[in-house]
Image (tube, rainbow, N blue to C red):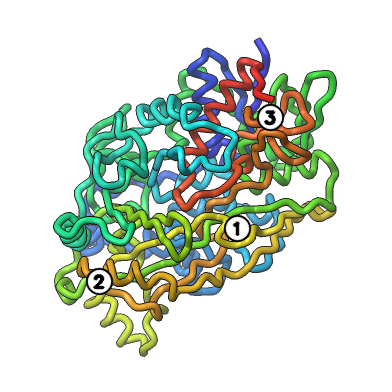
């Protein structure tokens, strides 16, 4: 049987491994594979726990990791500041140095990748989302179905079904917080307007036992400890390895590959000690994340001149005030990730935008301290009284809303990313602001924040699939142009980046590419 090697154990790498295991093929997964330290779980609501325990280690850590964004260290999205999630980005800058301008990329060398700390929203691509791809929706649908069964995804049929695709296999949605229930009920009374629709999020968080994992407990701890009700690809990889259906080689950093006589040889080194090693394969699937997959490809060609496009979703962050809720008691049982989604067919942007509406009761209060412009004592008072009446929406635009960043590999092994600041016009959001106000959610253009480029953590398009690819592009089957047995199985191969979270489509496409690689089929 041919040997198939997968580089990377994140969402796309694990999905590819699952597809091969389903076919009775035992792939080799090679990755650095950092894992979390397992503290004793807290089995009660955080707000009860902290009345009897010191919550400092849980929230801030022994080195004040939870305050990293306030200290001006390497700035990361909020969930990655939690001490428990330190393993997700461990040694990333040392293992893959970056030199960035107007871009702030987040990398992971953990087992399970960045999905260990993702927002858990999983949305099928539709025919419209695949505009510009050399794919049909029928190519991905069987894999969406398989992943829905594997993961356990909550959701339902509602106004967003036309945008999110089939609801087959979804389980009952999570309970909503009081603020978000109020907003959604107002929407249901008024209906969609001006091309804007709202519906329940599709989330990889269980409401019933699934595959040995428990249902979600509303304990306000999802930011601060592992919760197996929220899926991580690591769980699938752990199971496949325990069943002997996949071989995992951890502690290995792949640096380049060489193809000769139908065989692929990987050049790598051990993270501990730096020993050089080689791994041989009949077929290679690159799934190290768009940044590191592209770095490996350029290094394999000793190319320090080419500049490749790196796509990312520009985003806005909306603080939304619910005036009727100001001053009331904090909702202690709110799910801290996305609860509702909003889709806006915006005429002014000539594009479809997607928003994630979430509670802010789970993140540490320190994340909001610097957002208020008053004295420390006054800011603390405002946080106490205003946060119970606030929610947040992250609004994503398609990747083509701004020119792509450029991606280049320096001779010293540093990846150079030159982007552009997020300069999109907040004034163009006025129709959406007025719509939300009618639903009782108030904001102001002065409060809306342009998310730094890179912080959406949707990186794609460096090695895009094309019907007739050229160098550093892929065939529709995922095969890298110029190679017979090297496939790109992650978002580096995406042809474009719609405003929708790409994780589910990335996993489904990885399964498709793995099936093609296993069968030796081609679509040239």
Query: Farthest residue toward the top?
Result: 1
Look at 36% across and 89% down and name the residue there: 375
In the rendered image of this protein, does residue 158 appear above or below residue 61? above
| Mark 3 burial class by Cα count in 10 Å: few <14, some 14-19, many 20+ | many
Q: CA distance from mark 3 to mark 1?
A: 26 Å
Measured from the top left, where is residue 280 in percent x and y? 75, 23
Q: Residue under label 2, please give it.
A: 437
The tag earlier along the polypeptide, 3 or 1, is 1
Measured from the top left, where is residue 365 in percent x and y? 34, 70
Q: Residue under label 1, please give it.
A: 105
In the rendered image of this protein, does residue 348 appear above or below residue 205? below
Looking at the image, residue 512 sits to the left or right of residue 157; the answer is: right
Task: Specify the quadrant that holds the C terminus.
Answer: top right
Task: Specify the quadrant that holds the N terminus.
Answer: top right
The tag earlier along the polypeptide, 3 or 2, is 2
The label nearer to you, 3 versus 2, is 2
Measured from the top left, where is residue 125 in percent x and y? 44, 40
Look at 58% across and 25% down and name the residue there: 514
Element under disc 1: loop
The tag earlier along the polypeptide, 1 or 2, is 1
Q: Residue under label 3, please give it.
A: 479
């Amino acid at each position: 049987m041919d040997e198939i090697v997968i580089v990377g154990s994140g969402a796309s790498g694990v999905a590819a491994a699952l597809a091969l295991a389903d076919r009775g093929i035992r792939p080799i997964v090679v990755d650095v594979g950092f894992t979390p330290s397992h503290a004793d779980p807290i089995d009660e609501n955080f707000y009860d726990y902290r009345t009897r325990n010191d919550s400092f280690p849980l929230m801030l850590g022994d080195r004040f990791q939870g305050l990293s964004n306030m200290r001006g260290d390497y700035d990361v999205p909020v969930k990655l500041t939690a001490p428990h999630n330190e393993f997700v980005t461990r040694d990333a800058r040392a293992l893959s140095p970056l030199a960035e301008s107007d871009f702030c990329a987040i990398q992971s060398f953990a087992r399970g990748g960045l999905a260990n700390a993702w927002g858990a929203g999983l949305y099928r691509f539709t025919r419209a989302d695949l505009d510009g791809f050399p794919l049909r929706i029928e190519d991905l649908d069987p894999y969406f179905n398989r992943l829905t069964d594997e993961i356990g995804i909550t959701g339902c049929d509602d106004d967003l079904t036309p945008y999110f695709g089939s609801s087959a296999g979804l389980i009952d949605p999570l309970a909503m917080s009081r603020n978000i229930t109020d907003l959604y009920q107002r929407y249901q009374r008024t209906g969609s307007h001006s091309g804007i629709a709202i519906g329940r999020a599709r989330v990889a968080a269980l409401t019933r036992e699934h595959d040995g994992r428990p249902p979600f407990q509303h304990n306000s701890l999802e930011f601060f400890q592992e919760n197996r009700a929220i899926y991580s690809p690591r769980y699938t990889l752990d199971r496949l390895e325990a069943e002997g259906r996949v071989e995992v080689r951890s502690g290995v950093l792949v640096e380049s590959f060489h193809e000769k006589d139908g065989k692929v040889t990987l050049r790598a080194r051990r993270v501990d000690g730096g020993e050089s090693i080689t791994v041989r394969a009949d077929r290679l699937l690159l799934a190290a994340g768009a940044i590191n997959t592209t770095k490996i490809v350029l290094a394999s060609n000793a190319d320090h001149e080419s500049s490749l496009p790196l796509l990312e979703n520009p985003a806005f962050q909306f603080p939304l005030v619910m005036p009727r809720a100001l001053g009331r008691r904090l909702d202690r049982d709110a799910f801290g990730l996305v609860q509702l989604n909003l889709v806006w067919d915006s005429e002014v942007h000539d594009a479809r935008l997607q928003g994630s509406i979430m509670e802010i009761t789970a993140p540490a209060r320190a994340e909001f301290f610097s957002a208020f412009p008053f004295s420390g004592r006054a800011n603390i008072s405002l946080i106490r009284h205003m946060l119970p009446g606030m929610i947040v929406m992250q609004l994503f635009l398609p990747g083509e809303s701004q020119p792509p960043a450029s991606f280049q590999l320096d001779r010293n092994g540093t990846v150079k990313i030159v982007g552009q600041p997020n300069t999109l016009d907040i004034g163009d959001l006025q129709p959406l602001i007025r719509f939300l106000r009618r639903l009782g959610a108030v904001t102001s253009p002065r409060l809306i924040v342009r998310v730094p480029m890179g912080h959406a953590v949707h990186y794609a398009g460096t090695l895009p699939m094309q019907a007739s690819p050229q160098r550093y592009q892929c065939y529709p089957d995922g095969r890298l142009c110029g190679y017979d047995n090297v496939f790109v199985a992650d978002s580096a191969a995406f042809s474009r980046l719609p405003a929708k979270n790409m994780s589910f489509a990335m996993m489904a496409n990885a399964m498709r590419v793995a099936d093609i690689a296993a069968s030796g089929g081609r679509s040239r």
